[in-house]
Image: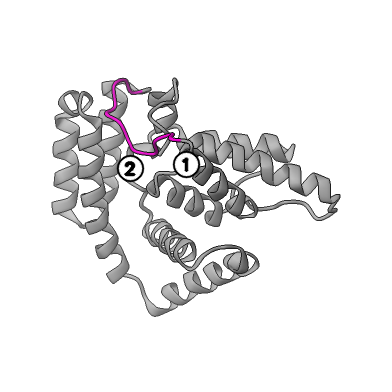
Amino acid sequence: MPAAEEPDWPTNYFNYFTEIEEHFQRARGTSLFLLSPLDWALIETWKNGGIPLEAVRRGIERAFEKWRASKRRQAVNSLAYCTQAVMEEAEIMEKGGISTASAPVVDAPFSVEELRTYLSSNAELVAAKGWTDLARSLSQLAAEAELHHGALEELELRLTVIEEKLLAEARSAQSEEQLLKVRREMENSLRPYRGKMTADQLSRLERQFLDRAVLEQAGLRRLSLFYLH
């Protein structure tokens, strides 16, 4: 997550994904470029790993500076190209005494009504799949949106727990063919970058990739407030 010291932290906390997407597009020089499922999974590993937003920005800039200096003709088509530079920048910030820990959320860039609508729509999607207990939990959170709007960090934890249960249900409903298809897509996407990441980074990225794919195949969305745009 972004560092607590960033002056625009409350906004950047919830815009972590879009901030990185837009920064990568600017660095690449193509605003219409769309991130791949692998890229989104990678961003989520950074978010879950506590990588500050500023470290990601700096890492992207440094990776493209290196790419331009090398005068390579092959375009950078994945955020994964910047992984090493991002991790190095995060390490530099940590050694410099810049905290990567999360801080209490003070102000959210969305209203109580937007939060209620977000929770309710996810509850409807989950209910349509027949997972009534999980849908009921989301509906209850939606009904108490005003209360949770003042305690978003706790709400995020609750959503994480519900999503873990949802993933388990969705994964058990997958066929062998669906699982095989996702695995193949993951291997094809990761192959060019396996030699540039540590075993731990690859393990985290594989998990996020598979989690996103499972929910997409089930016609569901991630529940985190990071996806409330």
Q: Residues within 10 Å of mark 1 (few under 14, many from 20)?
A: few
* Location of mark 2 (residue): 224
- Percent position (x, y) of residue 79? 61, 50
Label disc, if present, on residue 53 of the rendered structure: none
Which SS class for mark 2? loop
Q: Residues within 10 Å of mark 2 (few under 14, many from 20)?
A: some
Q: Is residue 106 magenta?
A: yes
Q: Is residue 37 visible?
A: yes
Q: Is residue 177 magenta?
A: no
- Of circles 2 and 1, the one toward us is 1
Q: Which stretch did the figure color magenta?
A: 97-108
Left or right position of 193 against 97: right
Which SS class for mark 1? helix
- Percent position (x, y) of residue 213? 44, 60
Amino acid marked by disc 1 = Lys
Amino acid marked by disc 2 = Ser
In the displayed structure, 127 sits above or below 147; it is below
- Percent position (x, y) of residue 184? 54, 74
Residue drawn at 30 percent across, 63 percent down: 170
The N terminus appears in which quarter of the rendering? Answer: top left
- Percent position (x, y) of residue 50? 40, 44
Q: Quadrant of residue 29?
A: top right
Disc with the residue nearer the chain's start (2 vs 1): 1
Q: Is residue 127 visible?
A: no
Q: Main secondary structure of the magenta part?
A: loop
Q: Quadrant of residue 210?
A: bottom left
* Location of mark 1 (residue): 95
User: What sort of colour scheme is used for the picture?
Assistant: one colour
Left or right position of 29 against 160: right
The C terminus appears in which quarter of the rendering? Answer: top left
In the displayed structure, 208 sits above or below 57; it is below
- Residue 90 or 142: which is nearer the viewer? 90
